Image (tube, rainbow, N blue to C red):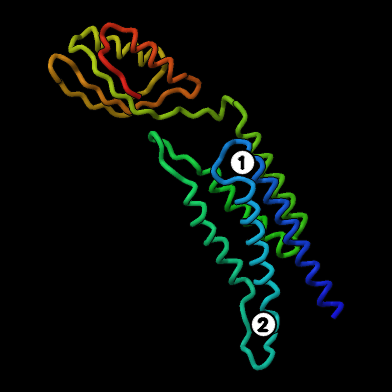
Amino acid sequence: MNDIIFYNLMYFLRLVVACICGGVIGYERKNRGKGAGIRTHIIVALASALMMIVSKYGFTDVAAGIDGARGADNSRIAAQVVSGVGFLGAGMIYFNRHAVKGLTTAAGIWATSGVGLAIGSGMYIIGISATFLIVICQIILHKNLKFLHMPNEEEISIIIEDTPEAMDFINCFLKEYNISVDSMKCSRNGGCLELSLVASVPSEFNIDGIMDVFQNNKFIKSIDI
């Protein structure tokens, strides 16, 4: 009886540690206003630790061949957690303005499940170390580091005068502000040109700045970003 109480307290401690680790990761995500925050990460870590405990210890009698059983693979449930959490992470990913959002949060959910599995298996040092490495990486890589800057892809619709001067202005503007046009559609409508651009805009460039420059120009009839 004492052994049963001891082991159950040990399992409970693992669940508590998994909750703490998940909460630490979720706290960083919550501070950045992401969809998956403290509660989501805690539940993922707790559930993963629980499933790991069940996977590792729930079938010991079967694995030992008691009562004529043929044995069991103790890793089966844990293996399903790794793939199953991917469906939860997929719900965090969405497409907005030609950019994929939520990939980091989805990856964090998947990593949190790994932390839960580690804690559930009794690998406290690895699980806790992974928790702090995840949080540190999240914090550092969200810093305003120049080598990490990636251009933002924007869709721009512009109606301009159908004149060479207007097109010259557009070309000069794109060149001056280092805006790269990935694709462009052009059509004529009543003496005006309707341009639909998909352009890569430098990450440090303010979209409001584009609006101000275009709206104050005599060649531009309308612009929508």
Q: Which residue is mark 1?
A: 29
Q: Secondary structure at mark 1?
A: helix
Category of crowding for the residue at label 2, using alpha-carbon neighbours closer than 10 angstroms: few (below 14), some (14–19), many (at least 20): some
Between the residue at mark 2 and the residue at mark 1, the CA separation in whole angstroms equals: 40 Å
Amino acid type of the residue that numbered disc 2 sits on in the rendered structure = Ala
Give the image quarter of residue 178: top left
**Amino acid at the residue labelled 1:** Arg
Residue 224 lies in quadrant: top left
Instruction: Give coordinates of residue 28: x percent, y percent.
Output: 65, 40
In the picture shown, does residue 191 fall above or below 19?
above
> From the image, which quarter does the N terminus lie in?
bottom right
Q: Which residue is mark 2?
A: 63
Residue at image position (61%, 41%) is 29
When the figure is inspected, residue 125 is found, relative to residue 171, above or below; the finding is below
Measuring from the top left, give residue 162's x and y in whole percent.
Answer: 18, 12
Query: For the point 39% across and 20% down, which residue is it?
Result: 179
Say if mark 2 contacts mark 1, CB within 8 Å: no
Q: Residues within 10 Å of mark 1 (few under 14, many from 20)?
A: many
Most foreground residue, 44 or 62: 44
Please identify, in this view, whether the residue under mark 2 or under mark 1 is nearer the observer: 1
